[in-house]
Each structure stands twice: as C-alpha cells, then as structure tokens.
Amino acid sequence: GNSVTQMEGPVTLSEEAFLTINCTYTATGYPSLFWYVQYPGEGLQLLLKATKADDKGSNKGFEATYRKETTSFHLEKGSVQVSDSAVYFCALSDRGGSQGNLIFGKGTKLSVKP
Amino acid sequence: GAVVSQHPSRVICKSGTSVKIECRSLDFQATTMFWYRQFPKQSLMLMATSNEGSKATYEQGVEKDKFLINHASLTLSTLTVTSAHPEDSSFYICSARVPGQGNSPLHFGNGTRLTVT
C-alpha cells in the first residue's frame, strides 16, 4: 500500500544552520505531496506542496522538490531560525477529489537553538 | 484562509465515561471532514471520514461503536469516544477541505489531547 517514510528525529540545529529532512514515499499512480508543520500546542498547517513530478514547493524559506525517479520529497531550508522549531510531517494524497485524504509520515521534531 | 476549530483542546476523563469532541469549519461549509488519531512519536492515522447527512466511513480496524461520529450540519462534525479506557488516550485531530478545491490541502483543527485515567 501507499506509505511515507521520513527521517526520524529529533533534529537539533543551531540558528542559521542548513536543514534537510528526508522523505520518501511509496505510491501507485501520481500522488500529490505535502509538508505540514505542527508548532507546539497547535494543529497542523500546510507548509508547502507539489502536485506533479519536478514541481518545487516553497514557503517561508523552505523548499522541497517532487522527485519521481527517487520517490522523494526532501524538505530543505538554507538558514533555520528558532521560530522554525516544530514537528514536520511529510504526507501524500492518494485519492483525488473531495474524498481525498492524506497518508502521513511519523513526523520529525526540529529544535533550533539560538 | 479557511479555519477549522476543534474543541476541547484538552480533556481528562475517567475510565468508562464518554467524551465528545467537536470539529467546526468556521468560514466554509464542509460536506466531508476527516478524523485522525496521533500516538506519541507516531504518525497521524486516519480513523474515519465524516459525511454530512450520512454515515461515516471508518478505516479498517477502527471500532465504529466505540468512536461515534455525527456530521449533523455542514459546519459541525463530532467524535464521541464511548466508554473510554486508558488505551484511548491519544491526540485526536480533525480536518476538512474547502469544497470544490479538488486535491487541495486539508485544513486542520488544533487537536484534542484526551487522557483517560
């Protein structure tokens, strides 16, 4: 079945360090791919998305490229801030239309130290 | 942007009692809402799809008699955990998609932390 695998955390970085959180997926067809972020005490928020191969999603300095050849959607940021501390979830949408739902990875907790 | 409100954010209940969690779409009508459960250090797992005016669709392994879902209006879905036990302690999150936006991202509530003592 469809699944998402992302690197296990926690990840601890110093401010302004480079961030990579790996995400790979298994899916039939052509899923859409997402990164969601969950700040402490809050619900999930969409960070970025890509709907087809070679698309690059970007937001708030974060980027991820939909790589069909490697079935990956790694999240990157060139210079992290303390405010980026959160849990990041990679997800894929395996059903189209209004009945679509998401399959999530286990989440990666990021802590950024000043 | 679209907002999904979930209430309560935290609830502690005694074993054997029932707990109701509400999920509201504040600025859009949601014919479909999704209920997820998140265990510590685990991914979010889809429990059920809530359909306005009809029965919910439960994922395999989710007890429909234990997790009662009612989608009574276009802006409200409720999840009732009946006869709760400590193993039901978890983080429950609802979500909804703005109608007509196809495969667009889901909008999530802030979640409900349930602790059963």
Image (spheres, coloured by chain):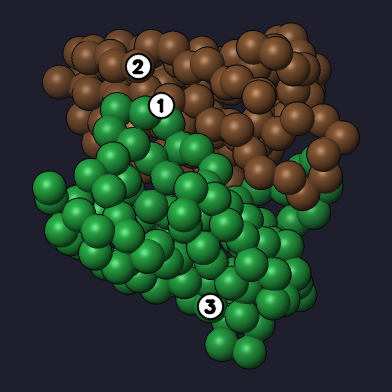
SS for dot 1: loop
Q: Nearer the viewer, residue B76 or A9?
A: A9
**Residue at 82% in and 39% down:** B101
The residue that label 3 is drawn on is A72
Q: Position of residue B74 (x, y in %)?
A: 76, 14
What amino acid is found at the position of numbered circle 3 in the picture? Ser
Graded by Cα atoms within 10 Å as few (under 14), some (14 to 19) or many (20 or more), the crowding at tag 3 reads: many
The residue that label 1 is drawn on is B111
What amino acid is found at the position of numbered circle 2 in the picture? Ser
Residue A95 visible, this orientation: yes
Using the numbered discs, state the Cα–Cα distance from disc 2 to disc 1 in whole angstroms: 6 Å
**Residue at 66% in and 24% down:** B2
**Are discs 1 and 3 located on one and the same chain?**
no
SS for dot 3: loop
Q: Which color was chain B given?
A: brown
Using the numbered discs, state the Cα–Cα distance from disc 2 to disc 3 in whole angstroms: 34 Å
